[in-house]
Amino acid sequence: MVTKERRQREFQKRERMFLQATRRLLLERGYGALTMDQVAEALEYSRGTVYLHFRSKGDLISALVLEAMEVVDGLLEKIDAFDAPSRDKAVAWSVIPEILRRLYPDYVTTQRILETQTTGERASEERIDRIRKAHRAIQDHLLGIVHLAVEEESLMMKGPMEPYDLLFGLVALSWGTMALRSDRAVLVGLEELLRPKGAPTRNFDALLDGYGWRPLSTERDYDSLRRHIWRRVFREEMDAIEKLHGKNPSSSTGGGE
Amino acid sequence: MVTKERRQREFQKRERMFLQATRRLLLERGYGALTMDQVAEALEYSRGTVYLHFRSKGDLISALVLEAMEVVDGLLEKIDAFDAPSRDKAVAWSVIPEILRRLYPDYVTTQRILETQTTGERASEERIDRIRKAHRAIQDHLLGIVHLAVEEESLMMKGPMEPYDLLFGLVALSWGTMALRSDRAVLVGLEELLRPKGAPTRNFDALLDGYGWRPLSTERDYDSLRRHIWRRVFREEMDAIEKLHGKNPSSSTGGGE
DNA sequence: TCATATTATGACATAACGTCATAAAATATC
DNA sequence: GATATTTTATGACGTTATGTCATAATATGA
């Protein structure tokens, strides 16, 4: 019965297409205007069919979040494979907010929606579980980089400081960066000032310098390293972004402006 | 016609009470479960009455956001009045996420909800406008601190660096910190690791050190400064928090643990 | 005390969610 | 190739919430 497998494949393909359509709707019209009917209509199916894939609207959202988080996990794997000193890997992490902003502009929004709901609120157990796992994986990758730094002796844990502090900092700063740069943040009023040039990455440099993570940004040109990273580590993503926006992405995070 | 004024006062008082009730409901049951009927019932009014105050559910949420943002603005005014070197003022800012977490635990959530909606989505014009103004005020305060630092020569703008970079960093980091520490973030999976001790404030110290904002944290004990700030600058807030939680709040952000 | 102005109410119209009995399509069997 | 069976898709239906507005209740002024 080979049919079964083919069916499965088709089913999964349709699921991805629903997610894609949802992303588009979300960007175009916002969450408030997102209805399951629209999602269904986008692929010319009926609402019932959408519910074969997603238990609820919340579940649909969590599927979006999950997809993006697994991408982040994949990016961190590329960083792992990037044979470089720990600080360079940390610098590679500073590029990720920009990648997400370009490839998954709804990432922040969907995360927000998800966190807005009460514990899972009908997202399927399985999905919640996979989200947890992805979170865990991302953390572990980041902690790995910090531990590497300690082994390498490029970073010293002074006083009450712990690897975990760095993890918190790296995550908080990237999260804040994405939140401030998300399209929606605009409506709340930081418009003019929050059109950053090098600010986001400069803050990563400062944070890591502040922890004394060698080599410091005074000893090494991290803007040009970031350009290198775009080309070498995130080549694929860069190409995808260029295809979408027709512009060199490294210029907006990398250089002076 | 003195009556008119009294009426006005009563009306505003009721509005505050609706907001308070909404906060409670939001914490207890989450946004998904928040209905206008419940808000009305909480004060034994009918739904129509709630709509005399708030044009829509979104407007109600934005009223919550606004209230909290005006509090932040007030806190920044206290920092302004705090006669101290610029870096000390910046350190005072690092305490604010903790104050908000305690006094307005719904702050992050409500902001999230608001940003999730499409441009204002029926929040009243007037309210949106006041939110914009509050945002602007907060920014200006922060920029003021940065400019003070430059005047004082405790901070040098090297190369392409701009005061604005600092603003972005301070806001992004505090925002990320609040997001990670909000109750809701838990559901997404960072549970164990994101139960920070000194991590949040340690990251502020590192960020500012990294920018070379003197005196560096190696030159001065900022944990004890934070305790001082709690007592002197945010006395009122500390008391309010103690009254609510019956615990000394400075211990969780301030000291080594 | 009665007229007028203000304020509160909840029935109503509308819209979306999520379910489920039934219809349609695909596959298997003879 | 026709029929039975299994799988998949549909949309009407029940439910719940929003936001409106004509009407009822209450307060003020003459």
Image: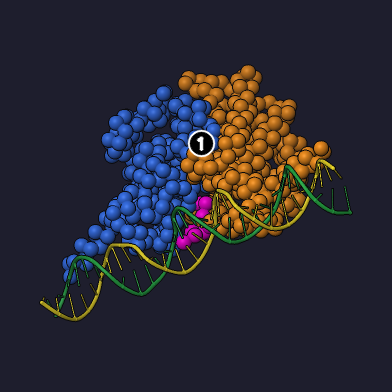
Chain colours: A orange, B blue, C yellow, D green
Give left or right: position of B251 versus A185: left
Of the 4 image quadrants, the one containing the N terminus of chain B is: bottom left
Residue A196's x, y, as percent?
58, 49
Residue B207's x, y, as percent?
51, 34
Residue shown at the point (47%, 42%) measured from the top left: A118
Give left or right: position of A118 versus B226: right
Q: Main secondary structure of the magenta part?
A: loop
Residue shown at the point (35%, 30%) measured from the top left: B250
Residue shown at the point (44%, 27%) measured from the top left: B197
SS of the residue under disc 1:
helix
Residue A36 is inside the magenta segment: no
Asked whether the viewer can see residue A21, the reply is: yes
Give left or right: position of B164 versus A73: left
Q: Of A181 and A87, which appears nearest the observer?
A: A181
Work out whether A213 lies above or below B38.
above
Residue B14's x, y, as percent?
28, 56
Asked whether the viewer can see residue A176, the reply is: no
Q: Which residues are magenta?
A: B115-122
Which quadrant would residue B57 be assigned to in this image? bottom left
Residue shown at the point (63%, 26%) measured from the top left: A145
The subunit carrying tag 1 is B
Residue B98's x, y, as percent?
40, 36
- Residue assigned mark 1: B187
Work out whether B79 lies above or below A77.
below
